[in-house]
C-alpha cells in the first residue's frame, strides 16, 4: 500500500531512450513498459522510468500523496519551491518542487 510522503518512484533522464533500455536490459536483465515513444517504465526493486523530457534533466525522486493539494500546501509551508504546478499525466497527477538544498523532487497521486 502506498503511503504519504514515502519514496514511490524514480525517474531517470535518458537522452537516447533506446540505448538506455538496451543497456539496462543487457547489463541487468531489466524489462520495460513503454508509454509512447518518449517514456519507458521499469519495475526492478523500485518502480521508475526513463524519459528524455527536459523537465527531468537529472534523477527525480517521486513521493506519493493520497491528497495531492494538501501535500503541495505542506511542501510550500515547509519552504519548498514549487517548480511545476499540479499537472495530469497518464496514471495520475503530480507536481514538482525544489527543497531548500536545491534538490528537485516530485509528488504524485492517482487521483
Image (cartoon, rainbow, N blue to C red):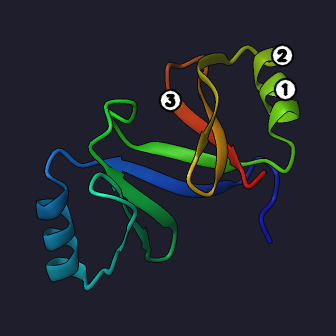
Q: Residue 7: image x %, image y %? A: 64, 54
For the point 22% across and 72% down, the residue is 24
Q: How far, Cα to Cα, is label 1 from label 3?
A: 16 Å
Q: Secondary structure at mark 1?
A: helix
Residue sticking out furthest to the front: 36
Q: Secondary structure at mark 3?
A: strand
Left or right of residue 43: residue 75: right
Residue 96 — which label? none
Q: Which residue matches tag 1?
A: 74
Camera-nearest residue between 91 and 79: 91
Q: How far, Cα to Cα, is label 2 from label 3?
A: 17 Å
Q: Is residue 71 above or below residue 27?
A: above
Left or right of residue 80: residue 19: left
Residue 77 — which label? 2
Q: Secondary structure at mark 2?
A: helix
What is the crowding at mark 1: few (fewer than 14 residues within 10 Å), some, or many (at least 20)? few
Camera-nearest residue between 35 and 59: 35
Q: Cβ–Cβ below 8 Å for labels 1 and 2? A: yes
Q: Residue 58: image x %, image y %? A: 34, 37
For the point 15% across and 63% down, the residue is 18
Q: Earlier in the sequence, mark 1 or mark 3?
A: 1
For the point 35% across and 49% down, the residue is 12
Indicate the quadrant where residue 50 lies: bottom left
Q: Residue 3: image x %, image y %? A: 81, 59
Q: Residue 65: image x %, image y %? A: 79, 47
Q: Earlier in the sequence, mark 2 or mark 3?
A: 2
Q: How far, Cα to Cα, is label 1 from label 2?
A: 5 Å
Residue 104 — which label? 3
Amino acid at each position: 500500500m502506498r503511503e504519504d510522503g514515502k519514496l514511490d518512484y524514480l525517474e531517470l533522464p535518458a537522452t537516447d531512450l533506446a540505448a538506455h533500455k538496451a543497456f539496462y536490459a543487457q547489463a541487468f536483465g531489466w524489462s520495460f513498459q513503454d508509454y509512447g515513444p518518449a517514456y519507458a517504465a521499469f519495475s526492478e526493486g523500485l518502480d521508475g522510468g526513463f524519459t528524455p523530457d527536459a523537465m527531468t534533466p537529472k534523477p527525480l525522486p517521486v513521493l506519493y500523496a493520497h491528497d495531492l493539494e494538501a501535500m503541495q500546501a505542506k511542501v510550500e509551508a515547509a519552504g519548498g519551491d514549487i517548480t511545476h504546478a499540479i499537472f495530469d499525466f497518464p496514471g495520475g497527477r503530480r507536481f514538482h518542487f525544489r527543497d531548500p538544498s536545491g534538490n528537485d523532487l516530485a509528488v504524485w497521486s492517482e487521483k
